[in-house]
Image (cartoon, helix red, strand yellow):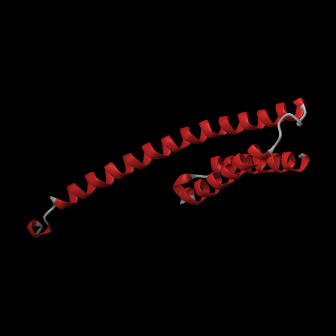
């Protein structure tokens, strides 16, 4: 059972590392958000499968508390990630609106009238 607990903790740490890395990235620089979300989703599914197999009654209270702290930390990182994604979404929306407005302005410009 101890091997499953260590494996569980290792995957939790990988999830933390992945999330911290994506938080440091600049989304406007073409960060691979699709790849990140797909990989993270698979990682969280594996963590879920491992957690089901662990007999939590055999895990010490200290270890459980430590794992719970790590999971809570992931939740806090997720909140930060959601805020960053919402900010990125708002900036993209503004950029799209400005591009559409510029396109409409250019449409009305007739080069045949210029002497």
Answer above or below: position of 40 versus 67.
Answer: below
The residue sitting at 64% across, 46% down in the picture is 23
Residue 113 position, x and y percent, is 8, 66
Q: Nearer the viewer, residue 65 or 87?
A: 65
User: Left or right: where does residue 78 sit relative to residue 2?
Assistant: left
User: Left or right: where does residue 115 sit relative to residue 95?
Assistant: left
Indicate the quadrant where residue 82 lies: top right
Quadrant in which the C terminus is drawn: bottom left
The residue sitting at 85% across, 45% down in the picture is 5
Residue 7 position, x and y percent, is 83, 51
Answer above or below: position of 49 versus 78.
Answer: below
The residue sitting at 62% across, 40% down in the picture is 78
Residue 36 position, x and y percent, is 61, 56
Answer above or below: position of 9 versus 106.
Answer: above
Q: Nearer the viewer, residue 35 or 29?
A: 35
Residue 110 position, x and y percent, is 13, 64
The residue sitting at 64% across, 57% down in the picture is 39
Q: How many marks?
A: 0
């Amino acid at each position: 059972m101890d091997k499953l607990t260590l494996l569980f903790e290792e995957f939790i740490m990988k999830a933390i590392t992945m999330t911290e890395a994506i938080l440091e990235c600049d989304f406007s620089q073409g960060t691979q958000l699709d790849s990140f979300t797909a990989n993270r989703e698979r990682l969280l599914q594996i963590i879920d499968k491992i957690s089901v197999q662990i007999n939590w009654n055999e895990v010490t209270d200290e270890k459980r508390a430590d794992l719970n702290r790590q999971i809570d930390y992931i939740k806090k990182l997720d909140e930060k990630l959601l805020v960053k994604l919402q900010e990125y979404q708002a900036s993209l929306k503004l950029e799209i609106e400005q591009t559409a407005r510029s396109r409409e302005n250019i449409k009305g410009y007739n080069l045949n009238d210029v002497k």
